[in-house]
Amino acid sequence: MTTSESQENPYPSSNLKKNLKNRHLLMISLGGSIGTGLFIGIAAPLSTVGPLGTIIAYLMAGSIMLSTMLCLGELSCAFPHAGSFQHYALMFIPNPIWSYTIGWLYWLSWVLSMAADLTAASMIAHQTFPSIPIYLFSLLILIVLTSVHLTSVRAFGESEYWFSTIKVLAIIAFIGVGIYLLNHQYSETHILPTFKTEKGWFPNGFLAILVCMTIVTYSFQGVELIGSAAGEAQSPQSVLPKIITGVAFRIILFYVLAIAVLALVYPYGTVHSEISPFVWVFNKAGISIASYLMLFVIFCAAISAANSAIYASSRMLWSMAQDKLAPQYFSDVNKRGVPTKGILFIAIIALVSLFSKYIAAEKLYIYLVAGTGQVGCFAWIIIAWCQYQFRKGVNNGKFPKGMVKFKSPLFPWLAGVSIIVNIVIIIGVWFGESGHFILLSEVVLVIIILVSYFFYKKRNSLIIKTLD
């Protein structure tokens, strides 16, 4: 790509097919952040910070998620690209090392997330068919999902549409059952439900809320997937403004209502890692068949998250290859516009999930959640910073005002607050339990990526700069 071409076209030409419909975008963005973090991971925050602390943690994370969605919406409407914020980092941050680092960190985050979600889905399937080992279920699910992605992007969109529909309907049903239980409990005992525990409103102090933001942030991670999907949507500029704010508020509402009902019904201090709190609530309501249905929903949620992981990581790898930040081998697509080489490579890497054969599956799930939650915060920081740079460029006349198809409010405060809070969350986790181990792991990983960048840069001296 020549300099003149890059100035006329702010992002590389894409051979990806624009086959995602509006309803696909809606449910991908809505269901992308409703995964095992809500259905399984919620047990940990409830036990550490209490009911009210959990709600506050999710409200805080939800507010930052909304800010991120608004910033990403402005960028995606102006520059729809499957690489999303990785490509925007190359456009708006002078040194390509930032784009390289966030691209590979995010790619690795999704690969590890996929392993965690495959493990979670296999754990549930193993409960129904205990004679079949967990690693065999993981392999079977991975083969099916890989086949879907190798078919077409529309196949992914359609599958994710129905997975997301199942999750949303399940949350609505759960909220309804929870409200029924609360009303029934009050009518029989006249005891008002409360968020207060025997140790007070915040059993481990307010600072513990920041510490538990690892799992909370992981729960919302995935909402930024709409940025990648916009690059393969039929009309992103017209549909994204309608989706962004509506979806963000719906996600916050679903999470807060579900957690509030769960916290009031589910007794504090009785968290059991071997059973989802959602299943416990349905059992308490005396709906035995519903508990099995809920297990199916959690199973679908885990598969949906793994499904999204394959999409996100394959498009990120394709985008980095387009930008000369990854081997060109992964920039190829087939006649259906599918980056098959990247998908197959990711499927092979995801076989780490089979380690559940040798390690307790529950422990593997928690380890992977803790190890990938921070990358989402880093990605949100990059999104906010790129939106700030883009809008500043528009205000300074570097970009025409007509490029702003969707304007996020409260500039520059929205981006600034998002950046600061995400930095606080990242630092706060380092002071929590096992924080030193998380910090050490992150430092080692970043050093490895930075070293690889300089070796890769030496071999590939020409790195695409899409904007002067």
Image (cartoon, rainbow, N blue to C red):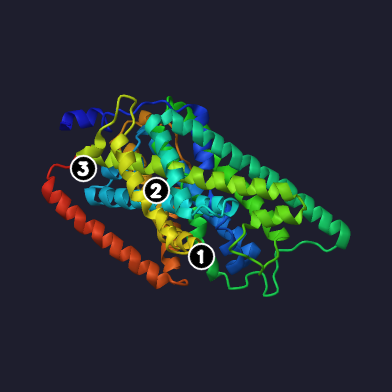
Q: Where residue 92 sits: x, y (%)?
A: 28, 44
Secondary element under disc 2, as helix, strand or loop, is: helix
Q: Nearer the viewer, residue 286 or 186?
A: 286
- The residue positioned 71% from the left and 55% from the top of the image is 281
Q: Where residue 457 sits: x, y (%)?
A: 15, 49
Q: Three-letter amino acid code at disc 2?
A: Ala
- Give the number of callouts: 3
Q: Where residue 130 sits: x, y (%)?
A: 56, 55
Residue at the extreme front of the image, as rendered: 131
Looking at the rendered image, the disc whose residue lies closer to the viewer, 1 or 2, is: 1
Q: Is residue 211 visible?
A: yes
In three-dimensional space, the C-alpha distance between marks 3 and 2, rounded to whole angstroms, equals: 28 Å
Residue at mark 1: 210
Q: Earlier in the sequence, mark 1 or mark 2?
A: 1
At label 1, counting other C-alpha atoms closer than 10 Å, the crowd grade (few under 14, some 14-19, many 20 or more) is: many
Q: Is residue 201 left or right of residue 237?
A: right
Note whether 22 is above or below 287 in the view shown: above
Quadrant for residue 196, please give it: bottom right
Residue at mark 3: 327
Q: Is residue 287 left or right of residue 135?
A: right
Secondary element under disc 3, as helix, strand or loop, is: loop
Note whether 262 is above or below 320 in the view shown: below
- The residue positioned 20% from the left and 38% from the top of the image is 328
Q: Earlier in the sequence, mark 3 or mark 1?
A: 1
Residue at mark 2: 384
Q: Three-letter amino acid code at disc 3?
A: Pro
Residues tagged 1 and 2 counted as in contact (Cβ below 8 A): no
Secondary element under disc 1, as helix, strand or loop, is: helix
In three-dimensional space, the C-alpha distance between marks 1 and 2, rounded to whole angstroms, equals: 20 Å
Note whether 208 is above or below 460 in the view shown: below
Q: Three-letter amino acid code at disc 1?
A: Leu
